[in-house]
Image: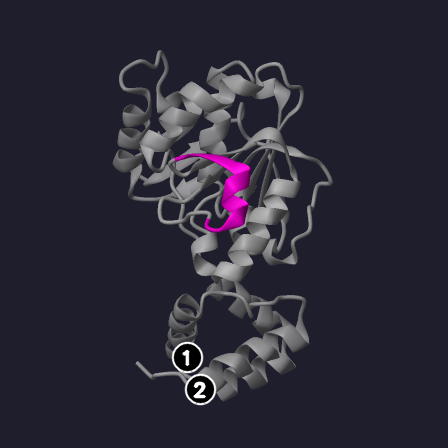
Amino acid sequence: MMKLTKNEIEQFIDAIDSNSNYDFSEYSIKSFTRRLEKLTMDYNCSVDELVKKISANNKFLEEIVKSITVNTTEIFRDPEIWTTIKDDIISKYQFEDPINIWHAGSSTGQEVYTMLILLKQAGLFNNADVYGTDLNTDVLNVAESGKYKYREIDEYIQNFDDTFDDTANFKLTDYFEISRKRSLMKVKPLLLNKAIYQKHDLTSLQNPFGKKFHIIFCRNVLIYFNHELQNKIFEFFLDNMVKGGTLIIGKHEGILGEIGTKFEKYGTIYVKK
């Protein structure tokens, strides 16, 4: 793999910035470098050639941006966290109407549908306004379709079983049509079209919906940003949450510095004081 120089990385970031509204200048250099190195391999070209193509072709630029973003999610990922959300978080908002929930960096939407299942089981489905945003429109289209062609069906079922620990009086198949032969999972109509999906660049620090949120999910997104940008986003989330609102981040992410004193911490779950 070709080793990239700092100058090449800056040149690439500047080219995107000059030709679009995207700003990758505060992404983690380590993770961004890995992605750029992969791009040069996938397209079999140098950074200079990538920059020229980006500058000349907006469609290619959008394609590159989609390639840079990370899209990993799964149904009931990290069951212990979903158990806490199910048992301790959702009930706090039972008298709120609407309950505003934002999945920032929602990728293909499995996390959104997981949350919708919990809301349905808690009798709060109709009280909730649920939003999913991502920089990548391709993954948002998948989320809206609710169709997942994956081999991890057994893993998802295990995640579900671990979350409910044999206490559930329903099955995952109540919410998904599962075809093992076609390796396909399809969200059933009772969940589909509930969430609103929208393209959004989290680094813009703009609230796309103009409302305060009771629950914000931003899992395994912030790890790709440097500490300065992470803190800006935590401050942004804080400003756009109701008092007592809940922020849920990834297992390998954390809130450091003064901003952390404005939350009560419960593992990867943070509650606004």
Residue at 45% across, 37% down:
111
Q: Is residue 91 above or below residue 54?
A: above
Q: Is residue 98 above or below residue 238?
A: above
Residue at 40% across, 66% down:
31
As drawn, is 203 to the left or to the right of 117? right
How far from the left and from the top, in percent, is residue 29?
44, 70
Provide the residue span drawn in magenta: 256-266
Mark 2, residue position: 46
Mark 1, residue position: 40
In what quadrant of the picture does the N terminus appear? bottom left
Find out whether residue 264 is within the magenta segment.
Answer: yes
Quick one: SS at disc 2? loop
As drawn, is 212 to the left or to the right of 109? right
Q: Nearer the viewer, residue 218 or 110?
A: 218
In what quadrant of the picture does the C terminus appear? top right
Q: Nearer the viewer, residue 161 or 139?
A: 161
Q: Is residue 3 above or below residue 231?
A: below
Residue at 65% across, 53% down:
205
User: Do the CB atoms of the residues marked 2 and 1 lie less than 8 Å apart?
Assistant: yes
Q: Residues within 10 Å of mark 1 (few under 14, many from 20)?
A: some
**Amino acid type at mark 2:** Ser
Q: From this viewpoint, is residue 186 visible?
A: yes
Residue at 57% across, 20% down:
93
How far from the left and from the top, in percent, is residue 141?
56, 47
Q: Nearer the viewer, residue 102 or 233?
A: 233
Find out whether residue 198 is within the magenta segment.
Answer: no
Kindly report the distance in space between the C-alpha atoms of the residues bearing marks 2 and 1: 6 Å
Q: Nearer the viewer, residue 154 or 4?
A: 4
How far from the left and from the top, in percent, is residue 196?
63, 37
How far from the left and from the top, in percent, is residue 52?
57, 86
Q: From this viewpoint, is residue 105 visible?
A: no
